[in-house]
Amino acid sequence: LKPYRLLLERIIRFKKHTLSQKEEELLSLQGEMASTANQVFRQLNDADMKFGVVKNEAGEQVELSHATYSQFMISPKRAIRKAAFEKYYAGFGAFENTYAACLIGSIHNDVFYARARKYSSCLEAALFPDNVPLSVYNNLIATTRQHLPTTYRYFDIRRRKMGLKEIHHYDTYVPILTAQESERSWDDSVQLILKALQPLGNEYCRVLEKGLKGRWCDRYPNQGKQSGAFSCGSFDGDPYILMNYKPKVLNDVFTLAHEAGHSMHSYYSAKTQPYQYYNYTIFVAEVASTFNEQLLSHYMIQNARSKEEKAYLINHEVDSIRATMVRQTMFAEFEKRTHEMAEAGEPLTTNSLKSEYRSLLEGYFGPNFQIDDELSLECLRIPHFYRAFYVYKYATGLAAAIALSRRVLEGGPRELKDYLRFLQSGCSKDPLDLLKEAGVDMTTPEPVDVALKHYQHLISQLDELI
């Protein structure tokens, strides 16, 4: 049984949160009922919602949907962005009480299960499977809050560059810089990524090149094909990647590097670990993927052909860090606050949810950001909130990736060996232990602090360049 020792110890850890046979049977009977709030949200949000139409730059009436909303938000015409924003949130406003009831039901469901299984809180229940202490979650929020003036500064730079007197949410996604998008074939992008990943060594790049030029990837958009991108690993086969690669879209190059990071993590773990320990946890999954994005961004910025291209690439990374660390931490704090309210017996209502979210928007966006009333409705439309305390892993993952990528770039053979050992480790140790051995201690505020200082440095560079 020695090879299964850790697996068995992990099962035994749950003993104190496992009920009697009759109690477990009773809990299992309400499984379908417990998912009702999420199911209602999905049906309402994905199938029933209609937002009307918005005129695009060509004067054509285009249906507003979840998919087209993001396209309208990058329109160079502010009137179009504003119209899409107002109409989109008017749709949510018309059903705000229904959306709120769904989210409140999901929160109460979390409280019920946490109490039934004798956890001290919903947060503890969510962090327990990964053996992550509450301090990691709280450090993320506290450290991010200390660095919020950096984001305020970025919004002011964005406002000035756009020539605006005041900045609104619908001004935060449109590119403030333009660059001639190179048309990169699939093979061109693969070669670019391989050059950027050279710090990971010849074997890593050789395996990845063979996979990306071979049959690891379903590469291009096709009729009836699922949108987006993801990687799917397996124990005794190749890892596979779904892409919808477009030759003129820079984000698709970063997406490919990201998914390649997942696939190489799967490749190394399956090659090194027995079946019971090859499948890594979500807590560490985003480290390997965003690590690759960090190396790609570093390489492209270092090799920019002009001041304008360098500024464009820096701004791309700034927006990525803002979306992944600052925004997701705001979401994480909202989840913490609302679950604590429910646990304390405070009534959750449409207005109390919106009020809590509004206070977070004011804190995270800063005193000079114009927060429209409609934006308080955003908290009702986030699907991840139905999988409580999940989004913080995006922020901690990127923080660890930034720290580890700096360590590999600035270090030598030892630092590279530490990182490759991490990729080979699967779930053979708890996630925090794996990261600590790789060179980053997530039980301290330091990795988040390092990542946000890097964010601050990028914004200073951007300010100088534009």
Image (spheres, helix red, strand yellow):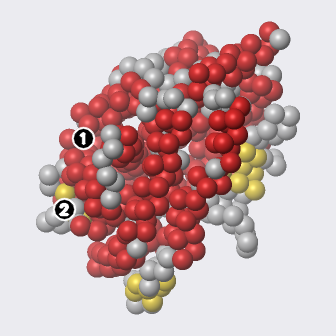
Q: Could you tell whether 127 is left or right of 3 in the image?
A: left
The percent coordinates of residue 76 (x first, y second) are 34, 72
Q: Amino acid at mark 2?
A: Gln
Q: Which residue is mark 2?
A: 370
Q: Quadrant of residue 392?
A: top left
Helix, strand or loop under label 2: strand
The percent coordinates of residue 100 (x first, y second) are 40, 62
The percent coordinates of residue 245 (x first, y second) are 64, 60
Disc 1 vs disc 2: Cβ atoms closer than 8 Å?
no
Name the residue at 85% across, 38% down.
237
Q: Could you tell whether 304 is left or right of 3 in the image?
A: left
Residue 278 drawn above or below residue 152: above
Q: Quadrant of residue 93?
A: bottom left
Name the residue at 49% across, 35% down.
115
Residue 119 drawn above or below residue 38: above
Is the N terminus in the top left, top right, bottom left or bottom right quadrant?
top right
Name the residue at 74% across, 24% down.
277
Helix, strand or loop under label 1: helix
User: Which sits in the foreground, 47 or 238?
Assistant: 47
User: Which sits in the foreground, 160 or 136?
Assistant: 136
Numbered circle sitting on residue 148? 1
Q: Could you tell whether 11 is left or right of 323 in the image?
A: right
Q: Quadrant of residue 284?
A: top right
Q: Residue furthest front?
A: 22
Q: Is residue 189 visible?
A: no
What is the spatial separation of the Cα atoms under label 1 and label 2, in whole angstroms? Answer: 16 Å
Q: Earlier in the sequence, mark 1 or mark 2?
A: 1
Total tally of numbered discs in the picture: 2
Name the residue at 77% across, 25% down.
276
* Category of crowding for the residue at label 1, using alpha-carbon neighbours closer than 10 angstroms: few (below 14), some (14–19), many (at least 20): some
Q: Could you tell whether 465 is left or right of 305 in the image?
A: left
